[in-house]
Image (tube, grey):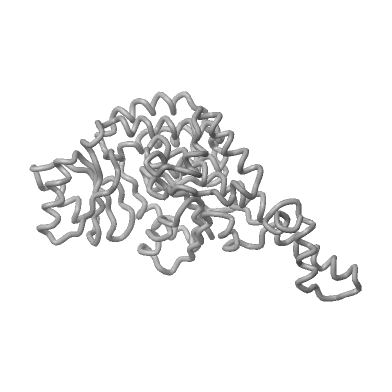
Amino acid sequence: MFSVLFPGQGSQSVGMGKIMYQNFDYVKSLFEKADDILQKPLSKIILEGPKELIDQTENTQPAIFLISYTIYEVIKKETSFNLNEASFFAGHSLGEYSALACSGSLTFEQTIKLLQSRGRSMQTAVPKGQGGMIAILGAEIDKINEIINNNEQFKCYVANDNSVGQIVVSGNVSDLNKLSEELKKNKIKNIRLPVSAPFHCELMRSATEKMRVELSNTEFKKPMVKIMSNVTAQYSNDPNQIKQLLIDQIEKPVRWREIVINMINSKVDKFIEIGPGKILSGLIKRIDSNVNLIQVNDITTLGHLPLTRRAERVLKNAYLEASERGLDVAGSEHLLLAFLREKDGVVFDVFG
């Protein structure tokens, strides 16, 4: 049994999706559609940068969704692998929106609009420079909760329970500095993250209220695959419940470690990460090193899945070229002739 995973913020990079954009016209159409919907050159920001622009939350969130959705479409069109046979779809934070779009609960247009609004409202919820996040390494969640709850000198919040020994905490900068000192006293390693806002905590209250309006006015359909919730670490396929959980998600911690454990306990033994990077696979490896992990982050990694439709067609045509010449076995020359039957792709570009 397998599950499909969709990454969240932090997986973005300038140039992500470029090879797909250059090779498939329908991918280019999706990029152009995103630009039209958002009324901004998101494609240019993704493909050319600069990094400062793609790292702005209101750009990051729709950009990561666009790449995840694009890869999903490429897999659907170019391979015979059916991702909708998955036991679960699970996305990390904004990745839950990607999961909902790919499962048919939300349309492409609905999702990218919601994520632009979500990113903008989360970015502006706290004045720039006043809030932040730190990653805590090598400590368990119970120990971090104990330190936070038993200290009146600062007020911080667990934002992400990502993996065994990896927890992210949000708060005001002054409180995070005090927490960092307390962690050092306990010999617990912590690193300030390059984000400008304290996500997934009550400091996001204004973002919650803005997204409550946006989500309340959005029609959700029942997803075709079970969707794991970041808030409950359980699946839900009820559109009204999903809507409420997405509202709650803005201030609630991401329970990724529990989500993964619950999927494994449901007999999932293979995880396919769809989107830029391979952050989620790294987190899962620390939770359970026995599961099978596959990352598809561009067409160069499609080979991690069963044969693509194009590969199946090329092989069939190679044998056809050989048989037309009275041969029982196809050689490299027949494979080249089969490639030349294709209407696009690298070989066609060179020899066509």
Q: Is residue 1 left or right of residue 145?
A: right
Q: Nearer the viewer, residue 95 or 333?
A: 333
- From the top left corner, tell me how far across and down residue 71 is, in percent: 56, 49
What is the residue that sits farthest to the bottom in this orientation?
328
- From the top left corner, tell me how far across and down residue 22 is, in percent: 61, 48
In the displayed structure, 116 sits above or below 93; it is above
Determine the residue positioned at 34% across, 46% down. 254
Q: Which quadrant holds residue 282?
A: bottom left
Determine the residue positioned at 42% across, 37% down. 59
In the displayed structure, 170 sits above or below 1; it is above
In which quadrant of the rendered image does the N terminus lie?
Answer: bottom right
- From the top left corner, tell me how far across and down residue 234 is, in percent: 41, 47
In which quadrant of the rendered image does the C terminus lie?
Answer: bottom right
Q: Nearer the viewer, residue 262 or 89?
A: 89
Determine the residue positioned at 41% across, 55% down. 280
Q: Is residue 78 left or right of residue 143?
A: right
What is the residue that sits farthest to the front in this orientation?
350
Q: Is residue 222 left or right of residue 199?
A: right
The number of callouts visible is 0
In the displayed structure, 86 sits above or below 155; it is below
- From the top left corner, tell me how far across and down residue 231 is, in percent: 36, 43
